[in-house]
Image: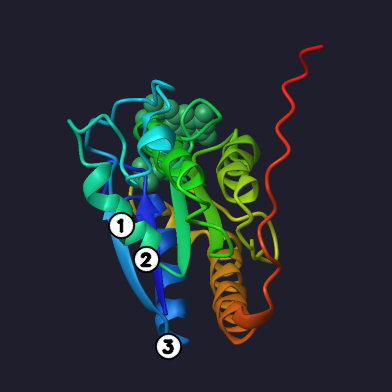
Amino acid sequence: MKVVAINGSSRKNGNTASALDAASAVLEEEGIRTARIEIGSLAFHGCIGCGTCRSKQNRRCRLDGDELNSNLETLFAADGILLGSPVYYAGINGALKSFLDRAFFVAGANGGLFRHKVGAALVAVRRGGAATALDQLNKYLGICEMFIPTGNYWSMVYGQAPGEAARDDEGMQCVRVLAANMAWLLKSVAAGRGSLPPPQTKAMMNFIR
Ligand SMILES: Cc1cc2nc3c(=O)[nH]c(=O)nc-3n(C[C@H](O)[C@H](O)[C@H](O)COP(=O)(O)O)c2cc1C
């Protein structure tokens, strides 16, 4: 089993990374392989809503000028996805937002490629806005029928300079609990794969009368 973690921060050794490291260590202890995608210092175009991923059904985004497509199959092959973001203006950082909008749209438009994977999220914050940013990440997981584990608080670690969040004992404990619950959920989903509910044709209603 494999979990792919996405670090939205441009700081590869920053506070988001500290939290992802702690979660990954627990997952590895539980026998789950982990990998990291670093996107924070790369430029990602936002989704332009062209719908080509839906019409072409080729598991790719039409915008080929950045590293979105080269990472998609890694995500589609994973059993679990762990999202990590620094808090920027009480939300997730821009590169991550662009990346996730397109990755999740391609997955949804191609038959629900994230469906029934386990998805977890965490954020790193200096002072305020962690709850809204975490909520934003969990929205991606929830819309595509991913299974979401929880920690013993909301998974936010506090710090500004790189390394500070590693000293947030409560935040880091929460992240480790989140990862332990993620590991258990991954194993449970694997054990129950034969009896997972079938997909339903989506009832789309745009509130136009
Ligand atoms: C553009 C920008 C916006 C930020 N906005 C917030 C914010 O709204 N609230 C907050 O508490 N910290 C904010 N911060 C601080 C970061 O969230 C904080 O330093 C975090 O630990 C960075 O994580 P990293 O080390 O993984 O990059 C902001 C930082 C930057 C660069």
x, y percentage for residue 6?
Answer: 37, 53
Where does label 2 land, which residue? 77
Residue type at mark 2?
Ala
x, y percentage for residue 95?
Answer: 34, 33
Residue 66 lies in quadrant: top left
Where does label 1 land, which residue? 73
Badge 3, how many Cα within 10 Å: few under 14, some, many 20+? few
Work out how far the residue at label 1 is from the one at label 2, CA to CA, in angstroms: 6 Å
Residue type at mark 3?
Gly
Work out how far the residue at label 3 is from the one at label 2, CA to CA, in angstroms: 17 Å
Work out how far the residue at label 3 is from the one at label 1, CA to CA, in angstroms: 22 Å
The kind of secondary structure element at disc 3 is loop
On the picture, is 192 further left or further right than 137?
A: right
The kind of secondary structure element at disc 2 is helix
Q: Are marks 1 and 2 in contact (CB under 8 Å)?
A: yes
Q: Residue at x 60, y 87 (%)?
A: 191
Picture layout, residue 5 above or below residue 109: below
Badge 1, how many Cα within 10 Å: few under 14, some, many 20+? some
